[in-house]
Image (tube, coloured by chain):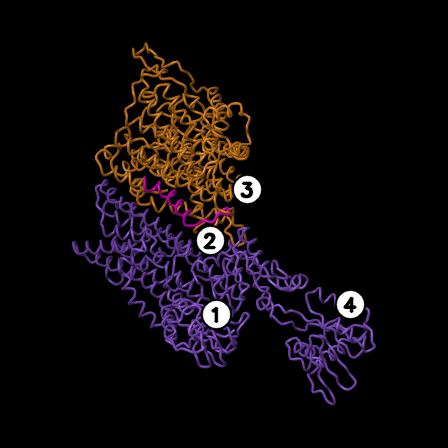
């Protein structure tokens, strides 16, 4: 697969240009209207205003320090979001530059051409493009064939052939015709071309909250709301104990308790998840589909190109009638010398590997017999030798015509090969049938392990193939898929999806043809290949620019990783609160109840240094976790139980322990620097 | 040794109850058990109930709220009018409006908070027809809500969650009444009082005084007091009074009865959702809390009372202050924890006299939300709310839309579970905040300083959890505490029940997602551990500051926390 450039013009997440732009955006996002959308951070902003007012009323180093660090907490959250958006914005800018205003050559009903700006084109117009022209908008080729450079979209520099009729008729606005002339019927509405959508997507302009994100938002809002009374009532409680509480400390406590860590990083995690897909040249039309990918429990995979290499390869020589293997290999190789098909070449290669038979020059008087649909054979005539290879029935008939007869065991060998899911090729030297070459559909290396991983993740794989059930079963067995759909048609594919969904499963599939469209639309995650038709691209909810069906597995993993990152940081954020209580509660009541100093198990220097340390930790942890939020937590395919155990240990137990250490360290630094 | 035997006997008895009463309750709630059909059917006809009519969650909630509202009115009316009603040998006058309100709410919400002295306030008629009736009905309402939520998990694509009236009547008729009847007889056999004969006057010729000893229909109230996790005693001294719990056996049976249904409902849950293991997992979390809190409190009480020690008195038998000599320290602590953690208001010792640490054990046990194992029905549905929150966080951590028992946990479920979990702490904290701020509230506690604060905090924690356990020390029969307490009890009951029923409705309507290796399993030790963690974190984070200012300061003042 070509390393993509186009959309995924890969920049580091911490590219200086992105970083500096994000820093500016972080300040712009201080606008209360922006903050209001995130209740957790909004509370922090309000808290900052409160401590600011208090600092003016009763200035002290402590109150100003808290105010500054609270403001930094908000800024760090903004920075995280701005950084997540940064790469997308940079990519959108690049795409906008590529979408240069081009002229289109619109065909008028009388057949003449009219030059109009591309932006004036509407659905149903027909335009002409010749070599050198940029295709003005998305459409279908209705006439002609051309090679097209699609690197602007896919990053793949090798040109592709696009022609009218069939599944290769779609062209995309912004791509360039390299040769020939085509007539294109515009299918996209104004402003809704693939390029426009792509810009919106990478920029995050059309980003909507996903169902799980909404659910998590509710949980975070609930936690924020519940901590308000928890903190506010401490004022009357301490009055009852004839003490007073410092409002600065109360605000600090509130900010430390509400889930600021996840609140600050939540939107960044979502944006970065989408961005990770874009990096792999997959455009998800909605965040919802990315999340659905994590939930997928049934994966429909096309056999050809995904599970198998797509070409049948010679895998064994099976001699019959007392001939030996080498004799058969030799004849088969000779018969295949002129055969440029992958099958033919694989026979030459196998003979060379097994018997060190070199592809040789054929001397003397010879002629190659090409394959034809009528004879269903090909071969070589060399002197008196007439070598043929081909379909069993055809070669048998031919050898009988030559005066020979088929050995008794031939039929059983042919049948056995067919049953194993392979294609039998019979080889004859004149009247003598030498044996059978087994052509196998080669399963991709490593695919079996991949499927094993999917199984441990609880995902069922179903192979979709047009092969007969026998062949399908054999390949399914070899590849290790859970199930297969043989002799697949668009109808029974759709039916299979509906059946799986009725059982509560979420289904993901890939497709490219127009007749895949209903199934793509029905599937919960439908990945359309970019090489596919516009109908397919419209029906699916993701487009793979590389047109690589294996990527479906990556998409599932990215979807899961996105959710795991959110869950892990939520757990971490809540677990952090334990240590903050131990830092702040003794400090808050130091004057009223000095006994509570026993809860200062971290041995923090003084009440104010304790509170400040907790607030600083709370702010710095956001910065520290930005890389994790943007990259996503490490994901290894495993069962839910083992992933859960691991993440509970790291983010739950770790989340409890880490702030004890962190707050203590900050306190030590504050003390060592003489601030306290 | 006797204590160890008590524990073993309790575990065996509860184990058998769990299995057999559990199976029986499933049959009752699914309508398969009809041996009292001859009462049931005419009752339905009389009340105009269609036994086959199912209710949506909205109708179910409305039925429940209307029923509870009417119950409050009737109970209130009886108390206000008791001087005109029969069975009033002591000629008790009308209960004051604020106290009648508080008491009516208290018994309808299964709280049994008592701001009155039973034997000096309520007529026999009131005790029997206002209070004991609610002692039967309010746990039945709890069972109804729990089973409605369980049906939400068990059903798929269903617009209904059962029928409130059927659940109410069946739980009362088949479970609460017959079993309480049997145990009331046992209590009578052991010597508990059961009479309508009025008080006796004993003349002491020696010093010339006449003592009035109140009596009444005690045993019949005693069984359901425990079995329905009610706790409202006939006498103010509650289970420490020999007329209520005359022997060691009745003390043991009391503990057994109050734990029975809350524990058994986990079996009902497992059975009805098709996997007893799921019920066992929930039970395991409950047992964990119960075990830890019992141990903690018992150890604290077996140690010396710091105040007594400061007076220079040796305490070889632990903190015996406020304990009934018949039961001793360990058994009292076990009773105390069992009662507070099942939201039963019963007591056989004075909790106010526990050591600061022991008192903290009782208080924090309630603060966990009464899930260890909690009250009849309420413990079950509350721990399921926590389980939903746990599944949500755990599910995200494995990268899949969270599911519990095949039901997707999404925004609506998180919202409802969140409300259900957080209503109680917010109610407790805010009402305590008001109480310490106003004169009427400040006048309540007997003690000043942190212990006084503990008394207020304990009262609202008890009422908001529909527990009814009293720390004593707080003068509760004032308009302020009667009214705010009533609000706390109503919120703690219905502001949780309605979200639970809404949850039942949404869950029932959902389809079922088949479990795969990618699903978080909810019947494993890992999940149980996570559930325990979530309950502890939610309880800990909301109550840490408040507890610090009460029992923690007290304990630290005396130099130790454990």
Q: Would you say the residues marked 1 and 2 are in contact, meaning their CB atoms lie under 8 Å apart? A: no
Residue range corresponding to the magenta coloring:
B404-427
Q: Which residue is mark 3?
A: B274
Q: Say above or below: A263 vs A110.
A: above
Q: Which residue is mark 4?
A: A411
Q: Are marks 1 and 2 on the same chain?
A: no
Label 1: how many Cα within 10 Å (few below 14, some 14–19, many 20+): many
Q: Are marks 4 and 3 on the same chain?
A: no
Separation (CA) of disc 1 from disc 2: 27 Å
Q: Are marks 1 and 3 on the same chain?
A: no
Please, which chain is the residue tagged with disc 2 on?
B
Instruction: Pick the residue in front: A622 or A614.
Output: A622
Q: Main secondary structure of the magenta part?
A: helix
Q: Which mark is residue A545?
A: 1
Does residue A508 show up magenta in the picture? no
Residue at point 78% right, 67% down? A411
Separation (CA) of disc 1 from disc 3: 46 Å
Q: Give residue A139's position: percent from left, percent from top.
A: 46, 70
Image colour assigned to chain B:
orange
Q: Are marks 1 and 4 on the same chain?
A: yes
Please, which chain is the residue tagged with disc 1 on?
A
Label 3: how many Cα within 10 Å (few below 14, some 14–19, many 20+): some
Q: Would you say the residues marked 2 and 4 are in contact, meaning their CB atoms lie under 8 Å apart? A: no
Q: Which residue is mark 2?
A: B401
Separation (CA) of disc 2 from disc 4: 54 Å
Image colour assigned to chain A:
purple
Q: Helix or strand or loop: what does disc 1 sit on? A: loop
Q: Would you say the residues marked 3 and 2 are in contact, meaning their CB atoms lie under 8 Å apart? A: no
Q: Which mark is residue A484?
A: none
């Amino acid at each position: 697969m070509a390393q993509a450039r186009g959309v995924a013009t890969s920049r580091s997440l911490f590219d200086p240009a992105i970083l500096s732009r994000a820093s500016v955006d972080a300040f712009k996002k201080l606008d209360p209207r922006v903050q209001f959308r995130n209740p957790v951070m909004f509370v922090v902003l309000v808290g900052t205003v409160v401590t600011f007012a208090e600092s003016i009323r009763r200035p002290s180093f402590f109150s100003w320090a808290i105010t500054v660090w609270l403001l930094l907490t908000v800024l760090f959250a903004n920075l995280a979001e701005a950084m997540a958006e940064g790469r997308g914005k940079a990519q959108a800018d690049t795409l906008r530059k590529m979408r240069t205003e081009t002229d289109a050559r619109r065909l008028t009903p009388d057949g003449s051409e009219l030059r109009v700006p591309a932006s004036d084109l509407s659905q149903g117009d027909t335009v002409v493009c010749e070599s050198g022209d940029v295709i003005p908008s998305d459409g279908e080729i209705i006439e002609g064939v051309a090679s097209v450079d699609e690197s602007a979209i896919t990053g793949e520099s090798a040109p592709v052939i696009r022609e009218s009729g069939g599944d290769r008729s779609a062209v995309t606005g912004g791509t360039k015709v390299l040769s020939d002339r085509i007539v294109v019927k515009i299918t996209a509405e104004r402003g809704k071309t693939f390029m426009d959508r792509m810009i919106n997507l990478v920029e995050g302009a059309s980003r909507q909250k996903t169902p799980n994100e909404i659910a998590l938002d509710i949980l975070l809002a609930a936690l924020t709301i519940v901590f308000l009374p928890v903190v506010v009532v401490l004022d009357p409680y301490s009055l009852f104990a004839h003490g007073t509480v410092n409002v600065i400390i109360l605000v600090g406590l509130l900010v430390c308790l509400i889930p600021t860590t996840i609140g600050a990083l939540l939107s960044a995690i979502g944006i970065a998840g989408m961005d990770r897909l874009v990096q792999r040249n997959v455009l998800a039309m909605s965040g919802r589909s990315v999340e659905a990918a994590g939930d997928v429990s049934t994966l429909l995979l096309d056999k050809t190109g995904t599970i198998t290499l797509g070409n049948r390869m010679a895998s064994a020589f099976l001699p019959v009638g007392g001939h030996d293997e080498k004799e058969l290999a030799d004849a088969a190789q000779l018969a295949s010398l002129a055969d440029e098909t992958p099958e033919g070449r694989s026979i030459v290669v196998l003979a060379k590997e097994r018997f060190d038979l070199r592809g040789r020059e054929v001397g003397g008087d010879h002629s190659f017999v090409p394959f034809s649909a009528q004879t269903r054979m090909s071969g070589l005539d060399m002197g008196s030798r007439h070598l043929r290879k081909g379909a069993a029935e055809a070669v048998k008939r031919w050898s009988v015509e030559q005066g020979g007869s088929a050995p008794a065991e031939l039929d059983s060998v042919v049948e056995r090969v067919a049953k194993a899911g392979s294609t039998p090729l019979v080889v004859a030297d004149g009247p003598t049938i030498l044996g059978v070459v087994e052509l196998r559909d080669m399963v991709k290396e490593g695919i079996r392990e991949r499927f094993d991983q999917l199984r441990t993740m609880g995902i069922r794989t179903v192979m979709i193939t047009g092969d007969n059930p026998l062949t399908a079963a054999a390949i399914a067995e070899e590849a290790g898929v859970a199930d297969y759909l043989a002799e697949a048609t668009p109808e029974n594919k759709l039916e299979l999806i509906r059946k799986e969904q009725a059982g509560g499963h979420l289904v993901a599939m890939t497709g490219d043809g127009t007749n895949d469209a209903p199934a793509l639309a029905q599937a919960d995650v439908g990945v359309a290949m970019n090489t596919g038709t516009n109908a397919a691209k419209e029906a699916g909810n993701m487009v793979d620019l590389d047109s690589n069906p294996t990527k479906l597995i990556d998409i599932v993993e990215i979807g899961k990783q996105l959710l795991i990152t959110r869950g892990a940081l939520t757990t971490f954020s809540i677990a952090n609160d334990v240590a903050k209580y131990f830092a702040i509660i003794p400090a808050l009541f130091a004057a009223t109840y000095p006994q509570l100093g026993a809860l200062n198990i971290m041995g923090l220097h003084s009440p104010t240094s304790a509170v400040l340390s907790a607030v600083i930790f709370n702010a710095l942890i956001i910065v520290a976790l930005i890389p994790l939020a943007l990259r996503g937590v490490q994901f290894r395919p495993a069962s839910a139980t083992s992933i859960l155990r691991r993440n509970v240990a790291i983010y739950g137990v770790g989340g409890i322990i880490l702030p004890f250490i962190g707050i203590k360290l900050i306190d030590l630094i504050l003390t060592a620097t003489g601030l306290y | 040794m006797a204590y160890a035997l008590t524990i073993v006997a309790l575990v065996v008895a509860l184990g058998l109850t769990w299995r057999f009463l559990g199976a029986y309750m499933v049959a009752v709630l699914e309508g398969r058990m009809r041996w009292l059909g001859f009462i049931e059917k005419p009752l339905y006809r009389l009340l105009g109930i269609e036994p086959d009519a199912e209710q949506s969650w909205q109708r179910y909630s409305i039925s429940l709220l209307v029923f509870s509202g009417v119950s409050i009115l009737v109970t209130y009316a009886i108390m206000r009018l008791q001087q005109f009603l029969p069975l009033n040998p002591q000629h008790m006058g009308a209960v004051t409006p604020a106290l009648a309100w508080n008491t009516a709410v208290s018994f309808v919400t299964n709280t049994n908070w008592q701001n009155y002295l039973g034997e000096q306030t309520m007529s026999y008629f009131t005790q029997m027809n206002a209070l004991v009736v609610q002692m039967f009905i309010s746990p039945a309402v709890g069972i109804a809500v729990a089973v409605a939520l369980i049906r939400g998990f068990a059903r798929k694509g269903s617009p209904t969650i059962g029928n409130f009236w059927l659940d109410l009547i069946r739980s009362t008729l088949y479970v609460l009444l017959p079993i309480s009847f049997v145990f009331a007889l046992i209590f009578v056999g052991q010597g508990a009082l059961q009479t309508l004969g009025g008080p006796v006057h004993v003349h002491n010729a020696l010093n010339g005084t006449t003592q009035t000893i109140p009596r009444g229909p005690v045993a019949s109230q005693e069984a359901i007091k425990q079995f329905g996790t009610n706790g409202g005693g006939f006498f103010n001294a509650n289970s420490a009074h020999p007329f209520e719990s005359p022997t060691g056996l009745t003390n043991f049976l009391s503990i057994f009865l109050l734990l029975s249904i809350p524990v058994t409902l986990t079996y009902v849950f497992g059975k009805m959702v098709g996997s007893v293991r799921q019920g066992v997992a929930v039970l395991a979390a409950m047992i964990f809390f119960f075990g830890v809190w019992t141990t903690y409190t018992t150890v604290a009480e077996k140690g010396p009372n710091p105040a007594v020690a400061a007076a220079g008195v040796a305490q070889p038998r632990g903190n015996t202050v406020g304990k009934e000599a018949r039961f001793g320290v360990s058994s009292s602590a076990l009773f105390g924890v069992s009662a507070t953690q099942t939201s039963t208001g019963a007591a056989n010792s004075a909790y106010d006299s526990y050591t600061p640490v022991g008192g903290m054990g009782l208080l924090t046990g309630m603060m966990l939300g009464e899930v260890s194992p909690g009250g009849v029905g309420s413990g079950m549905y509350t721990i399921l709310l926590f389980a939903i929150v746990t599944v949500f966080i755990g599910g995200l951590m494995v990268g899949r839309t969270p599911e519990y028992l095949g039901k997707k946990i999404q925004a609506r479920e998180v919202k409802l579970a969140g409300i259900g979990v957080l209503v109680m702490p917010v109610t407790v904290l805010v009402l305590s905040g008001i109480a310490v701020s106003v004169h009427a509230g400040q006048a309540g506690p007997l003690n000043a300083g942190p212990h006084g604060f503990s008394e207020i905090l304990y009262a609202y924690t008890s009422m908001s959890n529909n527990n009814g356990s009293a720390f004593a020390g707080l003068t509760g029969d004032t308009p302020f505490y009667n009214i705010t307490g009533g609000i706390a009890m109503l919120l703690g009951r219905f502001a949780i029940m309605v979200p639970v029923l809404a949850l039942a409705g949404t869950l029932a309507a959902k389809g079922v997602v088949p479990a795969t290796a990618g699903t978080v399993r909810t019947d494993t030790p890992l999940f149980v551990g996570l559930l325990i963690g979530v309950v502890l974190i939610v309880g800990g984070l909301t109550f840490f500051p408040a507890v610090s200012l009460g029992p923690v300061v007290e304990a630290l003042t005396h130099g130790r926390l454990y």
